[in-house]
Image (tube, rainbow, N blue to C red):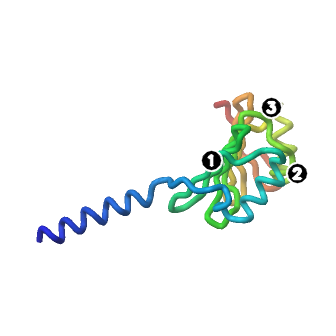
Amino acid sequence: MKKIIFTLVVSLFAFAAFAKDMPIQPNQLPANAQSFISSTFAGANIVAAQKDLDDYEAVLNNGTKIKFALNGEWESIEAYSAFPTGILPAAVESAANAQGGNIVKIDRDFGYFDVKLQNNIELKIDMNGKILKKELD
């Protein structure tokens, strides 16, 4: 009985250690994630990368933090300065820009984007650029 409990405890600790964010080399990010970073954030370098059970995360030397799904598609991006254009569909970007602030954070969800602007306005915008929700943070 003691062996079973000991094995169970060791297994739980091993799983917990595996589930935590594990530092990786930037070249261990999925190829499409690396390509997205180099084409979208030209001149920025990856200074830290990590992987956990369900995503990757990269931090760039300009302070931008990008979370990727395991397949390498970006899920969220957070930056201290304005984002490069072209990350979002044109209609979504236009709707966000019309609210008077630079985009500093975006989260991609099914059928819409959550967008936060420098002026602390948070928006939920559908793929066609329609603002579904607007609030002040």
Going by the numbered disc 1, the residue's amino acid type is Ala
Among the two numbered marks 1 and 2 on one chain, the one whose residue lies closer to the N terminus: 1
Question: Which secondary structure, mark 2?
Answer: helix
Under mark 2, the amino acid is Ala
Q: CA distance from mark 1 to mark 2?
A: 30 Å
The x and y percentages for residue 137 are: 64, 31
Closer to the N terminus: mark 3 or mark 2? 2
- Let me know if residue 104 appears in the view: yes
Q: Residue at x 75, y 48 (%)?
A: 125
Question: Which numbered disc, 1 or 3, marks the residue that appears first in the sequence?
Answer: 1
For mark 3, what is the residue?
A: 101
Q: Which residue is mark 2?
A: 90
Q: Residue at x 51, y 55 (%)?
A: 22
State the image quarter where residue 70 is shown.
bottom right
The reply to whether callout 1 and callout 3 are in contact (CB within 8 Å) is no
Q: Which residue is mark 1?
A: 48
